[in-house]
């Protein structure tokens, strides 16, 4: 489940021009509370989105 969320974040970062906070918020909202401890921090996700977009 967590890997699906990370993959979705990567896909949206590559394919959309949504803000990083919008992408993170949309994807984190769908995950269960018990799985939230396995998700990287907001800062780590934000940096990953920036890296994906700068690699374009």
Image (cartoon, rainbow, N blue to C red):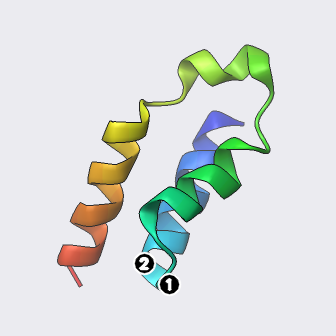
Disc number for residue 14: 2
Q: What element carries label 1?
A: helix
Q: Position of residue 3 (x, y in %)?
A: 59, 41
Q: In this view, does 47 lie above or below 51?
A: above
Q: Is the C-beta separation of discs 1 and 2 under 8 Å?
A: yes
Q: How crowded is mark 1: few (under 14 residues within 10 Å), some or many (20 or more)?
A: few
- Report the number of numbered marks: 2
Residue at (66% x, 43% y) in the render: 28
Task: Locate residue 22 relative to residue 56 in the image: left or right.
Answer: right
Q: Where is residue 31 in the image (x, y as percent from the top left)?
A: 76, 36
Q: In this view, does 2 lie above or below 26?
A: above
Task: Locate residue 22 relative to residue 32 in the image: left or right.
Answer: left
Q: In which quarter of the image is residue 1?
A: top right
Task: Locate residue 10 relative to residue 47 in the image: left or right.
Answer: right
Q: Which of 18 and 15 is in front in this view?
A: 18
Q: Which quadrant would the C terminus be assigned to in this image?
A: bottom left
Residue at (55% x, 52% y) in the render: 24
Residue for badge 1 = 15
Q: What element carries label 2?
A: helix
Residue at (60% x, 60% y) in the render: 8
Q: Position of residue 50 (x, y in %)?
A: 26, 64
Disc number for residue 43: none
Q: In which quarter of the image is residue 53?
A: bottom left
Q: Nearer the viewer, residue 45 or 1?
A: 45
Q: In this view, does 34 lie above or below 40?
A: above
Residue at (50% x, 84% y) in the render: 15
Q: Where is residue 22 in the image (x, y as percent from the top left)?
A: 57, 63
Q: How crowded is mark 2: few (under 14 residues within 10 Å), some or many (20 or more)?
A: some
Real-space Cα distance between discs 1 and 2?
Answer: 4 Å
């Amino acid at each position: 489940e967590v890997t699906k969320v990370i993959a979705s974040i990567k896909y949206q970062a590559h394919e959309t021009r949504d803000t990083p906070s919008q992408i993170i918020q949309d994807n984190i909202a769908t995950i269960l509370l018990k799985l939230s401890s396995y998700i990287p921090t907001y800062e780590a996700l934000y940096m990953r989105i920036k890296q994906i977009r700068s690699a374009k």
